[in-house]
Image (spheres, rainbow, N blue to C red):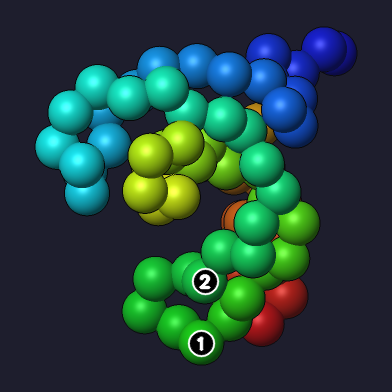
Amino acid sequence: MKFPWNVGDYASNTCPRCRKMVRTRFELRTVRLARSRLCVPDVLVDVCQECDHMVSIPPQSVPQLREAGLAK
Protein backbone atom coordinates (compact mmCIF):
# COMPACT_ATOMS: atom_id res chain seq x y z
CA MET A 1 0.00 0.00 0.00
CA LYS A 2 1.42 3.40 -0.98
CA PHE A 3 0.98 6.11 1.59
CA PRO A 4 -0.32 9.41 0.21
CA TRP A 5 2.21 11.62 2.07
CA ASN A 6 5.98 11.33 2.46
CA VAL A 7 8.58 13.36 4.34
CA GLY A 8 9.31 16.52 2.35
CA ASP A 9 5.98 16.64 0.50
CA TYR A 10 4.22 20.01 0.32
CA ALA A 11 0.52 20.78 0.73
CA SER A 12 -1.69 23.69 1.72
CA ASN A 13 -3.74 23.82 4.89
CA THR A 14 -5.24 26.31 7.33
CA CYS A 15 -2.84 27.05 10.19
CA PRO A 16 -4.62 27.59 13.53
CA ARG A 17 -1.81 29.82 14.78
CA CYS A 18 -1.48 32.01 11.65
CA ARG A 19 -5.26 31.88 11.05
CA LYS A 20 -4.85 31.71 7.29
CA MET A 21 -4.22 29.31 4.43
CA VAL A 22 -0.51 28.51 4.30
CA ARG A 23 1.92 26.22 2.52
CA THR A 24 2.77 23.24 4.70
CA ARG A 25 5.44 20.55 4.61
CA PHE A 26 5.36 17.01 5.96
CA GLU A 27 8.09 16.36 8.54
CA LEU A 28 8.94 13.84 11.24
CA ARG A 29 8.34 15.29 14.70
CA THR A 30 7.91 14.11 18.27
CA VAL A 31 4.22 14.28 19.20
CA ARG A 32 2.92 14.46 22.77
CA LEU A 33 -0.36 12.62 23.22
CA ALA A 34 -3.22 14.66 24.67
CA ARG A 35 -3.97 14.19 28.37
CA SER A 36 -0.76 12.24 28.97
CA ARG A 37 2.97 12.74 29.27
CA LEU A 38 3.65 10.18 26.57
CA CYS A 39 5.74 11.49 23.65
CA VAL A 40 5.92 9.54 20.39
CA PRO A 41 9.04 10.19 18.28
CA ASP A 42 9.27 10.23 14.49
CA VAL A 43 5.61 10.81 13.66
CA LEU A 44 4.81 12.22 10.21
CA VAL A 45 2.98 15.54 10.67
CA ASP A 46 1.95 18.54 8.57
CA VAL A 47 3.92 21.68 9.58
CA CYS A 48 3.23 25.36 8.75
CA GLN A 49 6.11 26.88 6.79
CA GLU A 50 5.49 30.35 8.24
CA CYS A 51 5.35 29.70 12.01
CA ASP A 52 6.66 26.09 12.29
CA HIS A 53 3.47 24.99 14.09
CA MET A 54 2.12 21.44 13.66
CA VAL A 55 -1.06 21.83 11.61
CA SER A 56 -2.33 18.25 11.25
CA ILE A 57 -1.52 14.57 11.49
CA PRO A 58 -2.16 12.54 8.33
CA PRO A 59 -4.30 9.38 8.61
CA GLN A 60 -1.27 7.16 7.92
CA SER A 61 0.31 8.29 11.24
CA VAL A 62 -2.73 7.44 13.40
CA PRO A 63 -1.89 3.70 13.80
CA GLN A 64 1.58 4.65 15.10
CA LEU A 65 -0.02 6.92 17.73
CA ARG A 66 -2.60 4.30 18.71
CA GLU A 67 0.11 1.67 19.14
CA ALA A 68 2.11 4.00 21.39
CA GLY A 69 -1.01 4.81 23.42
CA LEU A 70 -1.81 1.14 24.00
CA ALA A 71 1.76 0.39 25.07
CA LYS A 72 1.69 2.85 27.97
Callout 2 secondary element: strand
In the image, what residue type sits under mark 2? Arg
**Residue highlighted by disc 2:** 32
- Give how far across and how far down residue 14 sits, in percent: 26, 28
Look at the picture and state if 11 lies above or below 59: above
Residue sitting nearer the eye, 51 or 3? 51
Q: Residue furthest front?
A: 50
Query: Residue 42 occupies which quadrant of the picture?
Result: bottom right
| Contact? badges 1 and 2 (CB < 8 Å) | yes
- Label 1 packing within 10 angstroms: few (<14), some (14-19), many (20+): few
**Quarter of the image where one finds residue 41:** bottom right
Q: Is residue 72 left or right of residue 32?
A: right
Query: Viewer-proximal residue, 72 or 43?
Result: 43
The residue at 57%/64% (across/down) is 31
Q: Quadrant of the C terminus?
A: bottom right
Asked if 20 appears above or below 12 in the picture, the reply is below
Secondary structure category for the residue under label 1: loop
| One can see residue 31 in this view | yes
Q: Looking at the image, which residue sits at the far left?
A: 19
> How far, Cα to Cα, is label 1 from label 2?
7 Å
As shown in the figure, which amino acid type bears the numbered disc 1? Arg
Q: Residue at x 68, y 14 (%)?
A: 4
Drawn side of residue 32 relative to residue 50, left or right: right
Residue 59 visible? The answer is no
Which numbered marker is on residue 17?
none
Q: Circle 1 sits on which residue?
A: 37
Q: Is residue 47 left or right of residue 67?
A: left
Query: Of residues 23 and 57, which is closer to you in this image?
Result: 23
Q: Image quadrant for the N terminus?
A: top right
Please identify the quarter of the rendering in which residue 23 is found: top left
Q: Nearer the viewer, residue 16 or 33?
A: 16
Report x, y in % for residue 19. 14, 37
